[in-house]
C-alpha cells in the first residue's frame, strides 16, 4: 500500500478504535502535539481521543465495581439492542439507584447516536462514499459495511428524537463515576480539563491493574495515549502515543473485551471507516500498521498482559 494511503487508513483506524464504546466527544484543551501514528478523526469529525485532563483533587474510589465489558448480561443487552431508546428506558431506574455499569452504558447509548443526530440519510451517504474510497484490500465486505451502517442508524432512530444528548452523556458518566464504576471514572477524567497529577495517575493505574476490568483497561488506554499526566515516567513505554493505546486495547481483548469481527470495536471500525475485512481487532492492526510497528504493539501488549495478571503496577514504571 502506498505510504500516503497507509497514513490515511491508519488515521481512520485510530479514530475508530480510540472512539470505542465510551469515548466522549469534547475537544481537548490545547497542550501541543503528542507523538503517534497519525492525526485522529472520529465518526463525527471530532478529533479523538476526546479530552484531556483530570480531577486531580479527587481521591480514587473506595468502592470500585467492574464493568466487565460484554461479559455481563446488561452489557450484552446493550450490544444486542436494536432500539437504544428502549435500552435507556429499561435501565434508567437501576442506574439512578446506584448501578454504575448501567449508567455508563446509557451514556454510551447517547454517545453512539451523536453521529446520526442531524441527518441519518446524509450520514449513510457519507459513509458509503468513505467506503468507496478505501483500498480494495481494506473494504472487501460491502454487505457487512451496509449491515453495520443500517443497524447503527436503526438503533439510534428513536433516541435521536431526544435533545441535549451531550448533557445526557455528561450526567450519566458522572452518575456512573459516583456509583464507583471504574470505566465511568476514567471517562469523567477525559471530560475534565485539569492535568492528571502523578499521584492520581498511579492511583488510577493501581485501580485498573487490581480490577482487571477489560472495559477499564480499554478506557485507560485511550486516556494514557493523550500524554496528559504530570508524571512522565509512565510515558516511556505505555503512554503518550497511539501505539501505546493499541497495546492497551489488545490487552483488554486478552481480559475478555469482545474483539471479534462481530464485536463492538471491529463493528465500529467497519461502520465509521468502511474498513470491514477484519476478523478481529488484532487482525485490523496487523493489516493496517507497518510490520515493525505492529510487532512493537504486540510486544507492549504482551508486557501489559503479564503486568495486569501479576497485579504489579510498579512494572509500569520500569
Image (tube, grey):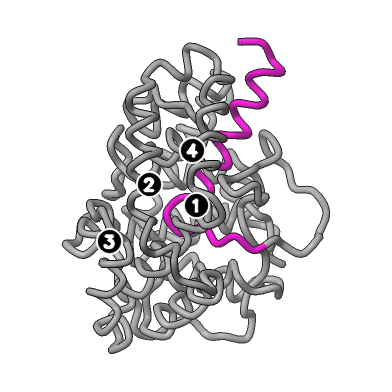
What residue is pinned by disc 2? 152
Q: Position of residue 97 (x, y in %)?
A: 28, 89
Nearest to N terminus: mark 2 or mark 1: 1
| Closest to the observer, 77 or 240 | 77
Mark 2 element type: helix
Q: Quadrant of residue 279?
A: top left
What residue is pinned by disc 3? 68
Nearest to N terminus: mark 3 or mark 1: 3
Q: Position of residue 152 (x, y in %)?
A: 38, 46
Residue 188 higher or lower than 52, as above or below: below
Residues at marks 2 and 1 touching, judged by CB atoms closer than 8 Å:
yes
Observer-side mark, 3 or 1, equals 1
| Closest to the observer, 67 or 208 | 67
Residue 135 higher or lower than 71, as above or below: above
Observer-side mark, 3 or 2, equals 2
Nearest to N terminus: mark 3 or mark 4: 3
Label 3 to label 2: alpha-carbon separation = 23 Å
Q: Is residue 161 left or right of residue 253?
A: right
Bounds of the magenta segment: 1-26
Q: Is residue 158 left or right of residue 54?
A: left
What residue is pinned by disc 4? 124
Which residue is at 58% across, 26% downward?
293
Label 3 to label 1: alpha-carbon separation = 27 Å
Amino acid at each position: 500500500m502506498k505510504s500516503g494511503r497507509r497514513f490515511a487508513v491508519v488515521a481512520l483506524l485510530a479514530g475508530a478504535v480510540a472512539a470505542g464504546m465510551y469515548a466522549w466527544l469534547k475537544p481537548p484543551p490545547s497542550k501541543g502535539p503528542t507523538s503517534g501514528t497519525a492525526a485522529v478523526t472520529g465518526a463525527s469529525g471530532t478529533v479523538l481521543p476526546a479530552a484531556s485532563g483530570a480531577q486531580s483533587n479527587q481521591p480514587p474510589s473506595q468502592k470500585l465495581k467492574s464493568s466487565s465489558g460484554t461479559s455481563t448480561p446488561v452489557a450484552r443487552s446493550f450490544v444486542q439492542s436494536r432500539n437504544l431508546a428502549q435500552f435507556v428506558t429499561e435501565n434508567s431506574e437501576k442506574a439512578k439507584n446506584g448501578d454504575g455499569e448501567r449508567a455508563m452504558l446509557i451514556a454510551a447509548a447517547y454517545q453512539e447516536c451523536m453521529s446520526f443526530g442531524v441527518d441519518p440519510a446524509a450520514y449513510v451517504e457519507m459513509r458509503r462514499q468513505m467506503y468507496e474510497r478505501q483500498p480494495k484490500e481494506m473494504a472487501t465486505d460491502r454487505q457487512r459495511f451496509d449491515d453495520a451502517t443500517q443497524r447503527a442508524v436503526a438503533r439510534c432512530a428513536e433516541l435521536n428524537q431526544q435533545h441535549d444528548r451531550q448533557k445526557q452523556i455528561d450526567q450519566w458518566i458522572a452518575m456512573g463515576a459516583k456509583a464507583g464504576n471504574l470505566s465511568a471514572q476514567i471517562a469523567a477524567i477525559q471530560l475534565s480539563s485539569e492535568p492528571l497529577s502523578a499521584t492520581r495517575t498511579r492511583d488510577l493505574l493501581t485501580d485498573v491493574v487490581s480490577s482487571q476490568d477489560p472495559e477499564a483497561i480499554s478506557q485507560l488506554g485511550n486516556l494514557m495515549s493523550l500524554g496528559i499526566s504530570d508524571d512522565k515516567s509512565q510515558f516511556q513505554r505505555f503512554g503518550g502515543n497511539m501505539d501505546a493505546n493499541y497495546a492497551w486495547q489488545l490487552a483488554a481483548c486478552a481480559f475478555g473485551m469482545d474483539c471479534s469481527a462481530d464485536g463492538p470495536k471491529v463493528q465500529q471500525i467497519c461502520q465509521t471507516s468502511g474498513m470491514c475485512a477484519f476478523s478481529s481487532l488484532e487482525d485490523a492492526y496487523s493489516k493496517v500498521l507497518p510490520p515493525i510497528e505492529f510487532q512493537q504493539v504486540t510486544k507492549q501488549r504482551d508486557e501489559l498482559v503479564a503486568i495486569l495478571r501479576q497485579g504489579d503496577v510498579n512494572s509500569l514504571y520500569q
